Amino acid sequence: MKLILKELSKKMRAIDFTMLTTRTAGGALTSRPMSNNGEVDYDGDSWFFTTEDAGMVGDIMADPIVGLTLTGERGLLGKPGIFIAIEARAELIRDKTLFAEHWTRGLDRWFPQGIETPGLVLIQAHASRIAYWDGEDEGDLAL
């Protein structure tokens, strides 16, 4: 399993954005693109920054189970890229020490005040299940 996770981590580095799906108070599913930090090795935890006023924060407080989907670019000769679906439990973190540990320069585009951005929240999504499809290779991992 660790070998498969390591291989998935390498492939995830090349994917710029993840779709983060939450359940609204009314029960609807809603998704939004979040930066997939390709500068870190994926170990089953995904980390995303947002602000307190984002709808996803309220969604996660009410139901911490989230979905993450990633799709890689087409390969050689038009071969479809990898598809990854992750079920995770999200936690909202408001600790500036952890903000600093997970901050990368690319985030300055969305949060010009860095870790001092008022209302900044870090979402940790800890995977419980990962399904992937990569050409004829596919699998389902329980973590």
Image (cartoon, rainbow, N blue to C red):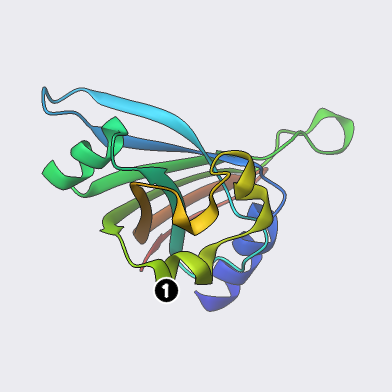
Q: Residue at x 61, y 63 (%)?
A: 9
Residue 9 position (above or below residue 136): below
Q: Residue at x 56, y 39 (%)?
A: 110
Q: Residue 14 location in percent, x, y?
A: 72, 49
Q: For this rendering, which residue is in front, 73 or 95?
A: 95
Q: Residue 120 location in percent, x, y?
A: 38, 50
The amino acid marked with disc number 1 is: Thr
Residue 74 located left or right of residue 47: right
Kindly indicate the quadrant of the structure image that contains residue 41.
bottom right
Quadrant location of the C terminus? bottom left
Residue 117 position (above or below residue 56): below
Q: Residue at x 88, y 31 (%)?
A: 77
Q: Which residue is situated farthest in the bottom direction here?
A: 2
Q: Residue 91 location in percent, x, y?
A: 26, 58
Residue for badge 1:
97
Residue 112 position (above or below residue 11): above
Q: Residue 116 location in percent, x, y?
A: 46, 56
Kindly indicate the quadrant of the structure image that contains residue 38.
bottom right
Residue 116 position (above or below residue 70): below
